[in-house]
Every structure is written in C-alpha cells, then in structure tokens.
Image: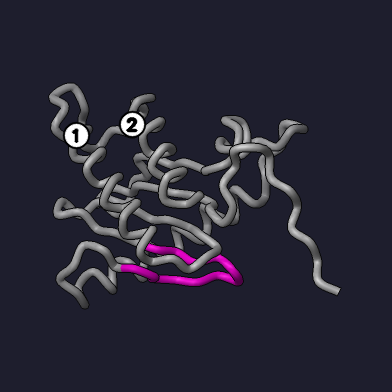
C-alpha cells in the first residue's frame, strides 16, 4: 500500500522545499522555505523546537555547494541545472557572474520552470546589488525582495 502525501495548507505549493542564495565566500545571504509559515521557514516547529526537516534541507544544500564549485568550471552557462540528489530531493544551482550561488531544493524534476525561476530571481538579485545602501556581503533582509521571490515561486511552481 502506498502512503498518501499529507494535505498542504491552502496556498502552499506542492513539490518545492527551499531556496537559498550563498555568496562567493560561502556565506548564506538569503533563505526561503516556500509554502511554510515564517516560524516554520525559520526552522521552528509548533512546539518551539528546531524542525529536523529544515536542518536536513540546509545540510543537503550546503553539501551540494561542493558539487556546484566543481560543475561551474565544466560549463560556460550560469544555470548548472541539476547538481545533486538526496533521496527524493533534487538540488538545482545557478551561479551569477559575481560568483554567488542560487540553490533550489525541490522534489520534482521540471528544469524549464527552475530555469525561469532562477532568471526572475537573478533580476531581483541584481536590483538588490545595485542598491547603494546594500553591502554585497550582507544578508538580504529586504521584504520586497522576499515577497517577489515568493511570488515568482508561486508563478513557476503552482
């Protein structure tokens, strides 16, 4: 007998876990858990304890950085596509001209939507970098950036 997937809350996206931007110096600049509340996105379960799934997602994505570093020299494109797998989770990567890495942890293979999502986020990221009040090494805490990344995710991963 096959196990049924739990129903997601209204408005939550199916098949999407976590998106992360990591600087050239391996410093996380932005992280977003799609389809989760702000407490769940921060890794806190309703009881106030750290959620194991959030830790697992972060571990898988940080482990994939080694593969990203290898693959970026094998191709001359910014979109590295699928770089790593862990069980049923897939890690896609995109490298900016400045060396920042975009990582998307996902459980469905849909490279066209992932490519379009990375393109949208790259445009938003460039706008943040062009802001004279933003330091390139500082975390991205802009609420408009966060809202637009989430909006793009909803558009590309319904």
For marks 2 and 1 on the same chain, the one whose residue lies earlier in the sequence:
1
Q: Which residue, as the protein is rendered here, is positioned at the far bottom?
A: 74
Measured in 3D between alpha carbons, the distance from the residue under mark 2 to the one under mark 1, in whole angstroms, is: 9 Å
**Is residue 22 positioned above or below 131 on the image?**
below
> Of 94 and 61, which appears nearest the observer?
94
State the residue at coordinates (37%, 44%): 28
Per the image, is 90 magenta?
yes
Residue assigned mark 1: 127
Q: Quadrant of the N terminus?
A: bottom right
- Give the class, few, some or many, for how many residues have Cα within 10 Å of label 2's Cα (few <14, many ≥20): some
Residue labelled with disc 2: 145
Q: Is residue 53 left or right of residue 129?
A: right
Mark 2 falls on what kind of element?
helix
Q: Position of residue 53 (x, y in %)?
A: 64, 51
Q: Residue at x 55, y 70 (%)?
A: 86
Q: Are marks 2 and 1 in contact (CB under 8 Å)?
A: yes
* Residue 130 location, quadrant: top left
Colouring mode (rainbow / by chain / secondary structure / one colour): one colour
Q: Give the overall secondary structure of the magenta segment.
A: strand
Vertically, is 8 above or below 142? below
Residue 150 position, x and y percent, is 43, 38
Q: Nearer the viewer, residue 137 or 154?
A: 154
Q: Residues within 10 Å of mark 1 (few under 14, many from 20)?
A: few
Q: Of the numbered discs in the image, which one, if any, rests on residue 20?
A: none
Count up the numbered dots.
2
Q: Secondary structure at mark 1?
A: helix
Residue drawn at x 44%, y 58% is 62
Give the residues drawn in magenta, as a range. 81-92
In percent of width and height, residue 80 lies at: 29, 68
Quarter of the figure with residue 36? top right
Indicate the quadrant where residue 134 lies.
top left
Is 114 covered by the magenta stretch?
Answer: no
């Amino acid at each position: 007998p096959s196990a049924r997937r739990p129903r997601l809350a209204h408005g939550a996206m199916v098949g999407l876990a976590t998106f992360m931007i990591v600087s050239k110096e391996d410093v996380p600049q932005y992280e977003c858990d799609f389809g989760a509340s702000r407490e769940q996105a921060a890794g806190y379960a309703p009881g106030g304890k750290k959620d194991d799934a959030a830790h697992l997602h972060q571990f898988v994505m940080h482990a994939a950085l080694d593969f990203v570093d290898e693959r970026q020299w094998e191709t001359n494109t910014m979109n590295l596509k699928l770089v790593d797998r862990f069980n049923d989770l897939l890690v896609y990567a995109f490298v900016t001209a400045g060396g920042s890495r975009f990582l998307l942890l996902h459980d469905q293979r849909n490279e066209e939507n992932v490519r379009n999502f990375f393109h949208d986020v790259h445009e938003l990221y460039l706008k943040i970098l062009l802001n004279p009040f933003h330091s390139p090494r500082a975390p991205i805490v802009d609420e408009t950036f966060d809202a637009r990344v989430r909006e793009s995710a909803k558009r590309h991963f319904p």
